[in-house]
Amino acid sequence: MTQQLRMTKQRAAVAGALDATDEFRSAQQLHELLRDRGDAVGLATVYRTLQSLAAGGEVDVLRTEDGEALYRRCVRDEHHHHLVCRSCGTAVEIDGPTVESWAARVAAAQGFSDIEHTVELWGTCAACRAAREG
Amino acid sequence: MTQQLRMTKQRAAVAGALDATDEFRSAQQLHELLRDRGDAVGLATVYRTLQSLAAGGEVDVLRTEDGEALYRRCVRDEHHHHLVCRSCGTAVEIDGPTVESWAARVAAAQGFSDIEHTVELWGTCAACRAAREG
DNA sequence: ACGAGTCATGAGAACGATTCTCAGGCTTGG
DNA sequence: CCAAGCCTGAGAATCGTTCTCATGACTCGT
Ligand SMILES: [Zn+2]
Ligand SMILES: [Zn+2]
Ligand SMILES: [Zn+2]
Ligand SMILES: [Zn+2]
C-alpha cells in the first residue's frame, strides 16, 4: 500500500547532513558538503532524496529571492514559518497565531478555496551583522 | 542624476500588456501574448523591461511554488500582499494590518535586522473551481 | 531637420538550477 | 543466497533567466 522506501547509505548521508545543521541549505550546498565530508553522493540523488523528504514533510522548503530552493530539517512538526538570515541561512522557527486565521478568513471572503499561505521573514542575523561591520 | 529611461515602443508594449490584465503573468507568457497581439518584442527585452519596472516599484513580483517569477501591475502603490489563484493568476490585493507589526516585532526580538517579509496567499478562485467541477 | 552620443533591442549563446535517462549496483524478502 | 526491482550516478536534457554584441532608435544640441 504505502510507498516503500529503501534505506541506502546515500539517503542516510543526506539526512545526516541535514541533521547536522540548523541552517537552510541548497541542494548543491548539501552536495558539496557531503563530498567534502567524504560521503560523496550524486547530485541527482541529493535532489531526489530532498524531494522525497519534502514530500513526506520531513524537511521544510523555501525559495530564495531568486528562486533557488533551500532545505532544512525543522525541530517542530506542526505548521510553522521561519525567520531566515539572508547571508548564512540560519533560521528560527516561528508561528503567527493571528496570521493563520487571518489568512484563511481573507481568502474565504474572496471566494477562494484550497487555500495555502507563504509567510517567511528575511533578515540579517546578529552574527552576520557583526561580522560585516566589525 | 536620475536614471534616464528612453521611451521605446517595446517598453510601451510591455507596459500595455501589463495594464491589460489583473492577473499575474510570467515573462514568457507576456512575451507570447505580445507576439500574438502583433506587438512582437524580444524575450530578452521583456525580461529587461520587467526587471526595470520591478526595480522602480511599478510592478509587483512573486515566485510560483517552483520558482518561476510572475509579474503584475498593481493598483495600489503602498505596500501590500496578494491572494492569487494558482491556475489562472487572478489576484486580489490585500493587506494584513496585524501582520506588518508582527513581522517586525518577531524579527527584532531575535536580533535580526534589515527585515523584509514575504506574505502571499494561494488558492483556487471561484471561477476556476466552477470550471473544474462543472 | 541633422548628427553625434548613447541607450535600447534582439537573436543566440551562456548560465545555473533542477530533472531526466538508463545501464549497472544495492536492498529487501523469501 | 537469489531474484525482483528500487536506487544510484554521470551526463544529457530542460527551463527560466541573463549575457553578448552588433545594429537600431531616442534625445539633445545646433
Ligand atoms: Zn547570518
Ligand atoms: Zn502559517
Ligand atoms: Zn482562477
Ligand atoms: Zn507586508
Image: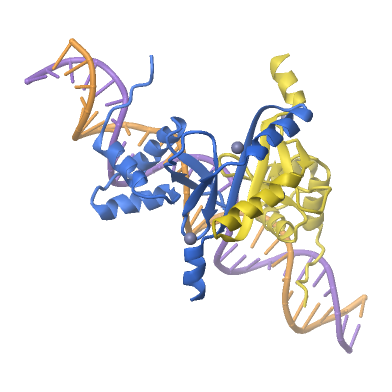
Chain colours: A blue, B yellow, C orange, D purple
Q: Quadrant of residue A105?
A: top right
Ligand 2 falls in which quarter?
top right
**Frontmost residue, D13 versus A39:** A39
Residue for point 59% across, 51% down: A121
* Left/right of residue A91 with respect to residue B78 in the rendered view: left
Residue for point 79% across, 44% down: B38
Q: Can residue A71 be seen here?
A: yes
Image coordinates for residue A21, horizontal then vertical, percent: 37, 50
Q: What is the quadrant of the N terminus of chain B in the image?
A: bottom right
Q: Quadrant of residue A9?
A: top left
Q: Can residue B85 be seen here?
A: no
Image coordinates for residue A29, horizontal then vertical, percent: 39, 52
Q: Quadrant of residue B108?
A: bottom right
Q: Is residue B85 above or below residue B97?
A: above
Q: Is residue C6 above or below residue B72?
A: below
Residue for point 40% across, 41% down: A47
Residue for point 79% across, 42% down: B37
Image coordinates for residue B43, horizontal then vertical, percent: 66, 51
Q: What is the quadrant of the C terminus of chain B in the image?
A: top right
Image coordinates for residue B115, horizontal then vertical, percent: 62, 58
